[in-house]
Amino acid sequence: MVKDIGIDLGTVNTLINIKGQGIVLDEPSVVAVNQLTKEPIAFGKTANDMIGRTSQDIEIVFPLKGGVIADFDATMAMVDHFVKKLKITSVLTKPDMLICVPTSITDVERKAIINMAEQSGAKRVYVEDEPKVAAVGSGLNIFIPSGNMIIDLGGGTTDIAVISLGSTVVSKSIKIAGDQMDEDIIRYVKENYELLIGDVMAEKVKKKLARATPDIEPASMRVSGRDLATGLPVTKTIKSDDISEAIATTLDTIIATAAGVLEKTPPELSSDIMFKGIYLTGGGALIKGIEGLFSEALGVKVIVPENPLQSVALGAGDLLEKLNSKTGFWTSIKRLFTSRQIFINPTGRENNQGAAVRVEGRSASVPKSDSATKQVGKNDHAHHTTDDKEKHEDLPQEDQLAVREEQLPSNTSVKDTTEEVSDDTINHAETGSDSSEQETENNSEETKESATEKPSNSSEENSEKLS
Ligand code: ADP
Ligand code: MG
């Protein structure tokens, strides 16, 4: 039987959900590479345990660090390893794969991910932005005409999005998140304690001592590192107050970004969000007192789901159920004879516009709307563009032409085809910058007029028709 899978390809953690089974893999996004042979030798937890403890011959690679695919080969080897480990792919059993990615990745990276999934044995590939999937995994119904706001505070990126009718209305992605807090802690401890600590220790300190509000019981911790004065190993006691001070600016930046998104949110959706609250997901949601800080600063209640580290992976499982409910022997056989199909961004298209976008043949990205994308914020060093022409120069011509809409229900109003198949969350971000911030807005009229049904119907019909 084919086991469709959802992959949360996070900057710090990769999780895999097998449809109907739940989360079966949860490992750090880390690869150890032999420098002599350039071959990857360990992945996930095994590679993570080697951090700071390797010889010169072994390099530890964080393939998605910073919210971009910094090392594509390593990312691919890692995903391939994890998928193979689950023993779910073979010539006879090619699963559909839903891959959840940070909103900051480029179209080229998106396309590369699709190729990667195919090479790992995927039949159909879906790519979706993490905040949308995190919203689904937090139990929100993002497909109805009602505003939902998600702040996904991960390791490399914080993705903030307002979603309605399965589509992102306003969003912002900043490369300031958990990793930045680790760096803040390293710097603080260095400056105030003359103690040099590593990334692993900084993260441990953060998890144990970080407090977002002063009302939480303080704590302290013995922290080992190198004394900057003597150069010798030393252990010093660090207090939670220190760590709260160290990460305060980073938390403020995230709050300011969320406030910016709220300011751009249309009033009807704002009132929905006021009523429902803002959902905070990702590992950063586990910082003690963070709900209180955020809700105080934003004037809206903040809800952290039970398992914020798993929200995306859980949502991926839910979406897979909706995308293709047919399993079993005959479905597997039928799929064998089906031409290769690639679906991109299942949620928005199939519901919001009432149409699924299918890209036939080679992997491709989807044309983007003319929605405003602008650079904001003091940390913005990246360049983003909404120029469709420029965007699609990355794609082979046949791919650019292959995108098309299908199966529009009669109640769906269509004004502009490009708009219908546009992706409102894809942004261009040049890699290589230290930090960047991007914003996408799409207050399209079509969004408000379009179908309100859950996407399952159209997607199932679509899958059936294609099978
Ligand atoms: P990503 O999706 O980018 O892989 P995750 O959502 O998995 O990120 O979150 C990883 C981040 O969350 C890391 O920076 C990690 O240090 C942080 N994190 C995990 N648990 C905690 C905790 N208890 N307190 C504070 N931060 C945490
Ligand atoms: Mg994540």
Image: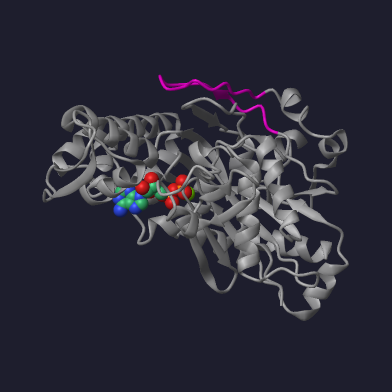
- The foreground one among 340 and 323 is 340
| x, y percent for residue 451 | 64, 51
Is 10 placed left or right of 334 in the picture? left
Q: Is residue 394 visible?
A: yes
- Segment tinted magenta in the rendering: 368-386
| x, y percent for residue 72 | 64, 42
Is 434 placed left or right of 70 in the picture? left
Q: Is residue 147 visible?
A: no
Is 158 placed left or right of 332 in the picture? left
Identify the residue at image location x=78%, y=45%.
363
Toward which corner of the image does residue 107 lie, by quadrant?
A: top right
- In the image, is residue 369 part of the stretch drawn in magenta? yes
Residue 85 vertical position relative to residue 281 in the rendered view, above or below: below
Toward which corner of the image does residue 227 lie, by quadrant?
A: top left
Q: Quadrant of the C terminus?
A: bottom right
Residue 453 vertical position relative to residue 277 in the rendered view, above or below: below
| x, y percent for residue 335 | 81, 68
- The foreground one among 445 and 85 is 85
Identify the residue at image location x=51%, y=29%.
439
| x, y percent for residue 349 | 67, 48
Identify the residue at image location x=55%, y=62%.
16
